[in-house]
Amino acid sequence: MLALVYVTLRFIHFGALMLIFGNALYSVWFAPSSLQRLMLRRFQAQQKMAALISLATALLMFAVQGGMMGNGWPDVLSADIWRSVLGTQFGGVWLWQIILAIITAGAAWLAPQKGSRLLLLAMGQFVLLAGVGHAAMDDGAPGALHRLNHAIHLLCAATWLGGLLPLLFCMRLSSGRWQTAAVYTMMRFSRVGHYAVAGVIFTGIINALFITGIQCALADGLRKNVVVQMCAGGVDGGNCAGESVFSGATLSPGYRVGANPFYQDDTGRSGAGRVGTGHGQSVCDLGTLLTRFKDI
């Protein structure tokens, strides 16, 4: 039961951090200066709640981890167990995670207009998250490379998934007086999103190789089959969400900013949708290629 609670808290913690990171990324980087202030005001309430949720889940995860290392629920609130947890590698990393979560919550509530500050704080928390879990099982140079790769993996995932909710807001703005700025913002997210998804796939493959053992994974036919199936499954699973979003919202740099990117053709699909479907099909083709590669 404790393990299930921990996994649930971890999922909520990641989701809150991704929301903070995505909102701040749009407000600071993707949006032009004419739209930044509007987006900062629009996302203030979300950033405040997400920061509090991130802090609460970080504290609860630390307590639950103590129960998992101890004797179950009675040790969840044991100060002695907490001190013992702080002496572990997880505790050393998670203490800084809690500190950054406190600073992030303070920044979100006291200085909500400082989007760049929230962006850096969320980025720092993702880097710390790479120091716990499967990336912490290796020591020395391989361990450092594993954690660096996993940090990039998390940041790429946050760039894409964290940007989906702000994308919906930009879609609403694209039919009004903010159309030019909104379309420009979505075009930038579309371009960066391609690299982010590619980064998730590539670093995910590297993570799988680190977990299973790089040399063994390449030499052992059974392990190669497992690794490639994981990668192909990750591509296919990500494509379920990716194609649904790209099919309705992805923009191509070739579109004119002043034109309506969501015009309908004779097939009933939007212009952006036809471009997005092409990108989604490319990911499908990659998944098929990986699946066939496992039989080599």
Image: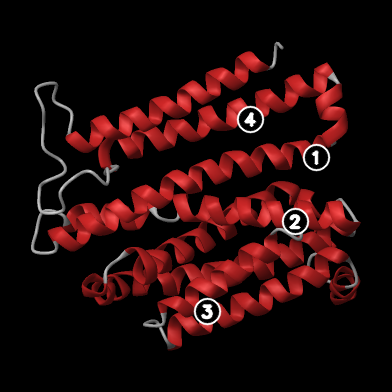
Q: Nearer the viewer, mark 3 or mark 1?
A: 1
Contact between labelled residues 3 and 2, with CB atoms less than 8 Å apart: no
Name the N-terminal-most of marks 2 and 1. Answer: 2
Q: Nearer the viewer, residue 137 or 290?
A: 290
Residue 147's label in the rendered image is 2
Residue 123 vs residue 242: left or right?
right
Point out the image quarter for the C terminus: top right
Q: Which colour scheme is used?
A: secondary structure
Q: Which of 262 and 48 is in front in this view?
A: 262
Callout 1 amino acid: Ile
* Residue occupied by mark 4: 231
Residue 104's label in the rendered image is none
Q: How far apart are marks 3 and 1 (CA)?
A: 34 Å
* Residue occupied by mark 3: 105
Judge the density around disc 3: few (<14), some (14-19), many (≥20) Cα neighbours within 10 Å: many
Name the N-terminal-most of marks 3 and 1. Answer: 3
Label 4 residue SS: helix
Name the N-terminal-most of marks 4 and 1. Answer: 1
Residue 244 vs residue 98: left or right?
left
Contact between labelled residues 3 and 4, with CB atoms less than 8 Å apart: no
Label 2 residue SS: helix
Residue 39 drawn at (x, y percent): 28, 70
* Residue occupied by mark 1: 211
Callout 4 amino acid: Cys
Q: How far apart are marks 4 and 3 (CA)?
A: 36 Å
